[in-house]
């Protein structure tokens, strides 16, 4: 099965192309701190290049996998709209995966000693999106804490149970001091463990349940309501 | 070539299919009713609604047209101006639909879409309108007067310096306690009132009493629009009146307010006809549904073309119509296209970089 997977939950644009032999090609775009995300302008272009490099075309794909977030709202919508549009155009399967799980599983795979991982993304406005995962003895990854938006001082409290915790993601970098104060290890800022990879999206997407029509069932995981709705209720 | 187009610049999720002969095969519009309780369109909520609906609306448009996706020859979408987050849902969907099949793609300017609605022959009953003509576009988001020489492109003769005409209708309606959106309610209330009771700024009755100084007269001679002063005038008028008086004269207030908006639109259109010598006027935008405006347009000394209401308000058939005459980008050139919020269409050089989510307002004219 040839799977195209991508994620736009963070400012980065990460694309993976899993070939029939199970190997994966990857491309990514990480904007500098003063640059805007390249989701709208880079995602399809990078995908086109990856396909070309493998001697493939969109028509050769069997499945599209997309990171559903949580993350930046506009980024998620560009990713999900692109994934749905491609799947609808080609009439192929579409699978949505959790961006936080992808982040955690990516870290577990490359870090042999990390069985407890907090996936933390910067949610802006002084909050983080967080989920907690455990690598079980059977090799499966269990979700201990479902994705939620949390204030930085509450991040560490999630890591009370279990063994040694480490936290990955741009939110882990941003809120390093709060996490370390709670005994959670955070890899160096420049560590690739903090990056969501297209490869993990492809792997999770290949295993996930997929839809072959009704593409609207694959929706962004916002985890936050629009400000206007909350403001209206407070009136 | 069969065209599939998407439009998502504001709060309507739209998809349409145009046959190879240019006839509208389907024109699906889903208006988001979710913004009324907020008293205006909330960008984040609009974007979420577009996300929910985009693929369903596309599927429905294909279905109603009796067309399979592999019969589509060109995909188009609104690139701007509009709410960037909303535009990006339609644009990303459309680019992906095109890319999957390596189809060409046409990015369309929303205002060009309103102009191009006039090129559509609706259900064979009406003749299409061909350039050259003047076009008055008035909606909740835009108010401008343009000169259309060819089927692609237009020259802006005048535009609003502040609020859009539809926005003025909605704000006036809210001040009169008619809720949001209130344009239609204001029109109903105005039907029983005296349009000359209150000489609001921009109205004929105000102008006939002589302007207020040279600056005002100079403005009246330009083809630009301004509705902010009108809104303020209504606010002051409402403050001056007692509650009982407001209640008794709501019809007059609404009629005079509406007359000021319509007079202002008609006066600029008349002047543009005079200046260009072009006695052909087309109309676009939701305000074209206003009965008083339509009546007054009918009195103009010109050939006036008003598309059916469904083609005046935001829709994707007009985007598909514009796409027929726009430059189509071959695959894969369009993959880097971004949406733009305001101003003119960005050049291709600007679309490939990142970091430009907003365009500076067009300067000069
Ligand atoms: Zn419009």
Image (cartoon, grey):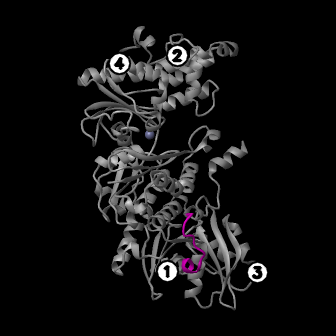
Check disc 3: other Cα within 10 Å, few if <14, some if 14-19, many if 20+.
few
Q: Which chain does tag 1 point to?
A: A
Check residue B121 for magenta coloring. no
Separation (CA) of disc 2 from disc 1:
64 Å
Task: Give the residues in magenta.
Answer: A204-214
Separation (CA) of disc 1 from disc 3:
30 Å
Query: Badge 3 is on which residue?
Result: A161
Check residue A208 for magenta coloring. yes
Q: Position of residue A218 (x, y in %)?
A: 58, 65
Which numbered dot is residue A199? 1
Decide whether the magenta segment is chiefly helix, strand or loop.
loop
Q: Is mark 1 within 8 Å of ligand 1?
A: no
Quadrant of the image containing the N terminus of chain B: bottom left
Q: Which chain does tag 2 point to?
A: B
Mark 1: secondary structure: helix
Where B279 sits versus B196, above or below?
A: below
Q: Is there a contact, CB below 8 Å, between mark 2 and mark 1? A: no
A96 left or right of A55 in image: right
Q: Which quarter of the figure has residue A166?
A: bottom right
Query: Badge 2 is on which residue?
Result: B256
């Amino acid at each position: 099965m040839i799977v195209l997977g991508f994620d736009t939950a963070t400012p980065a644009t990460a694309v993976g192309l899993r070939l029939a032999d199970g190997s994966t090609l990857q491309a990514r775009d990480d904007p500098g701190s003063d640059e805007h995300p390249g989701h709208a302008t880079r995602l399809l272009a990078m995908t086109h290049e990856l396909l070309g490099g493998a001697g493939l075309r969109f028509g050769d794909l069997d499945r599209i996998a997309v990171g559903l977030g949580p993350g930046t709202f506009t980024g998620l919508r560009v990713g999900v709209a692109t994934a749905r549009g491609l799947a609808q155009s080609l009439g192929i399967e579409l699978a949505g995966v959790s961006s936080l799980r992808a982040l955690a599983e990516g870290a577990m795979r490359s870090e042999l000693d990390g069985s407890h991982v907090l996936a933390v993304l910067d949610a802006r406005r002084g909050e983080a999106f967080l989920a907690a995962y455990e690598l079980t003895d059977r090799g499966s990854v269990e979700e201990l804490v479902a994705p939620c938006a949390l204030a930085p001082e509450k991040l560490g409290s999630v890591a009370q149970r279990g063994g040694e915790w480490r936290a990955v993601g741009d939110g882990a970098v941003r809120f390093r001091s709060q996490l370390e104060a709670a005994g959670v290890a955070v890899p160096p800022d420049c560590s690739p463990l903090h990056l969501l990879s297209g490869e993990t999206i492809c792997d999770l997407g290949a295993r996930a349940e997929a839809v072959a029509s009704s593409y609207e069932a694959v929706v962004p995981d916002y985890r936050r309501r629009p400000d206007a709705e909350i403001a209206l209720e407070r009136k | 070539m069969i065209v599939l187009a998407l439009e998502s610049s504001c709060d309507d999720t739209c998809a349409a299919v145009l046959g190879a002969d240019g006839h509208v095969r389907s024109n699906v519009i889903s208006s988001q009713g979710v913004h009324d309780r907020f008293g205006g369109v909330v960008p984040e909520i609009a974007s979420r609604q577009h996300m929910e609906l985009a693929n369903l609306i596309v599927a429905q448009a294909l279905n109603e047209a009796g067309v399979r996706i592999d019969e589509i020859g060109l995909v188009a979408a609104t690139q701007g101006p509009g709410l960037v987050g909303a535009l990006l849902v339609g644009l990303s969907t459309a680019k992906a639909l095109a890319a999957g099949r390596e189809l060409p793609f046409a990015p369309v300017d929303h205002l060009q879409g309103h102009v191009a609605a006039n090129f559509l022959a609706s259900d064979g009953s009406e003749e299409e309108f061909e350039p050259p003509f003047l076009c008055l576009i008035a909606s909740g988001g835009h108010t401008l007067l343009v000169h259309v020489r060819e089927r692609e492109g237009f020259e802006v003769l005048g535009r609003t310096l502040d609020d859009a005409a539809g926005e003025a209708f909605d704000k006036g309606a809210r001040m009169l306690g008619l809720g949001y959106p209130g344009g239609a309610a204001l029109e109903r209330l105005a039907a029983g009132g005296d349009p000359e009771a209150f000489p609001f700024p921009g109205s004929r009755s105000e102008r006939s009493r002589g302007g207020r100084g040279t600056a005002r007269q100079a403005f009246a001679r330009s083809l630009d629009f301004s509705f902010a002063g009108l809104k303020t005038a209504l606010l002051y008028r409402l403050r001056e009146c007692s509650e009982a008086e407001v209640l008794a004269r709501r019809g007059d207030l609404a009629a005079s307010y509406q007359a000021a908006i319509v007079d202002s639109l008609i006066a600029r259109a008349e002047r543009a006809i005079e200046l260009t010598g072009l006695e052909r006027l087309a109309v676009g935008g939701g305000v074209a549904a206003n009965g008083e405006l339509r009546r007054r347009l009918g009195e103009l000394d010109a050939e006036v073309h008003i598309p059916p209401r469904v083609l005046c308000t935001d829709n994707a058939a007009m985007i598909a119509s514009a796409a027929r005459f726009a430059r189509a980008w071959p695959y894969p050139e369009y993959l880097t296209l971004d949406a733009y919020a305001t101003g003119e269409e960005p050049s291709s050089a600007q679309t490939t970089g990142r970091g430009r989510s907003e365009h500076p307002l067009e300067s000069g004219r």
